[in-house]
Image: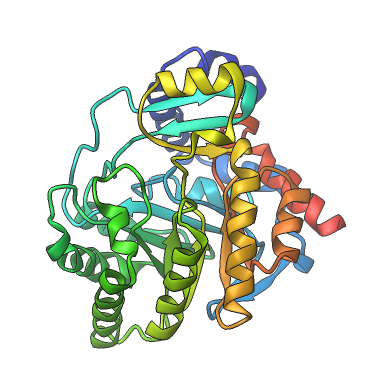
Amino acid sequence: MYRLLKPLLFRLDAEKAHNLAFTAGGVAQRVPGFLSLSAALTGKPDPSLRREAFGLAFPSPIGLAAGLDKGARLLPLWKSLGFGFVEIGTVTPRPQPGNPKPRLFRFPEAGLILNRMGFNSEGAEVVAKRLAHRPSGLIIGGNLGKNKETPEEKALDDYRAAYRLIAPRVDYSVVNISSPNTPGLRDLQAPEKLKPLLEGLLALRKEMGLERQALLLKLAPDLAMEDLDALIETVVASGFDGLIATNTTLDRGIVGGDLRARVEAQGAGGLSGAPMRDKALAVQARVQEKLAGRLPWIACGGIGSATQAKESLEGGASLVQIYSALIFEGPGLVKRMNGGLARA
């Protein structure tokens, strides 16, 4: 069905196509019997894929990365497709529209996406209410961010506000300070700014009695290696439970020739998808080397096949996440990746 619909969807503006797909998905998951049929066609992940990480038992190491289902709208559908876990968000404490449109662009011939969405969010209160009706048996992570207008010195207040509402409804939480689309956000990665942010969230976690729930930090792929090393040591020393490597990149050097010119013509934003694979692998190799087994981490960036997922898992990742490949390959990708990993 996706192969039939894809040409039509790709004729539309990328964000309109996204909204149309989510509307259709929302309708479909309410149709009696649809989710059961979807699950039957997909099949449950093979028991050999089960993974233990962050104090949780994942039925498959294949997860949906944050950014696609920002508002936790299609959780039953993702479960039926065979995902081992789903990360919702990024969720900001207060609703915000994000950046002006157009802000999402696809380059199908390269499996590349450019986005400058800017944390468009319904707000933590709305998303928390939706999470109250989450499907059973699906591991869910909550990716948290600050509002655009919040000054850097008040960032902790925003993360704490979002955490208070979202953390009790999810299985793990992620602090996103690595999106390139909120001005100044990546400045929080500097150790002297990061340390009080992490400590403040850990104190809140303890206050809320959620010490057993993992807190993760999502990394940018554009840090100099020495800065990445310092960030990793700050995270390890803080008592955080893990990392996600990586977010989208600002590096236009991952594409070349005519494609690079076309990408640059669309303006600012982070790049994700197949061309990011080598850059993400380089960062992930450094993460694995510097962590030296002290913390688990999740691989994200340019993963679109069972072979690539296996490579990341063998490279030290506990889990992997996909996003862009799902847009270009369709929902059947999850079944193919689970099957390929099980055979491997």
Residue occupying the point 37% across, 83% down: 238
Q: Compared with residue 165, is residue 207 higher up or lower down, i.e. above or below?
A: below
Q: Is residue 188 visible?
A: yes
Quadrant where the C terminus is found in the figure: bottom right
Q: Please provide percent x and percent y for residue 110.
A: 63, 26
Q: Which sits in the foreground, 27 or 124?
A: 124
Q: Which sits in the foreground, 236 or 97?
A: 236
Residue occupying the point 24% across, 51% down: 184
Q: Quadrant of residue 181?
A: top left
Left or right: where 251 falls relative to 159: right
Q: Please provide percent x and percent y for residue 114.
A: 45, 31
| Residue most extreme to the right | 343
The type of colouring in the image is rainbow
Left or right: where 197 falls relative to 264: left
Quadrant where the N terminus is found in the figure: top right
Residue occupying the point 37% across, 86% down: 211
Left or right: where 103 falls relative to 203: right
Q: Please provide percent x and percent y for residue 4.
A: 64, 18
Q: Please provide percent x and percent y for residue 190.
A: 32, 66
Q: Quadrant of residue 256?
A: top right
Q: Is residue 33 visible?
A: no
Q: Compared with residue 257, is residue 170 higher up or lower down, i.e. above or below?
A: below
Residue occupying the point 28% across, 81% down: 199
Instruction: Give the total number of marks visible in the rendering.
Output: 0
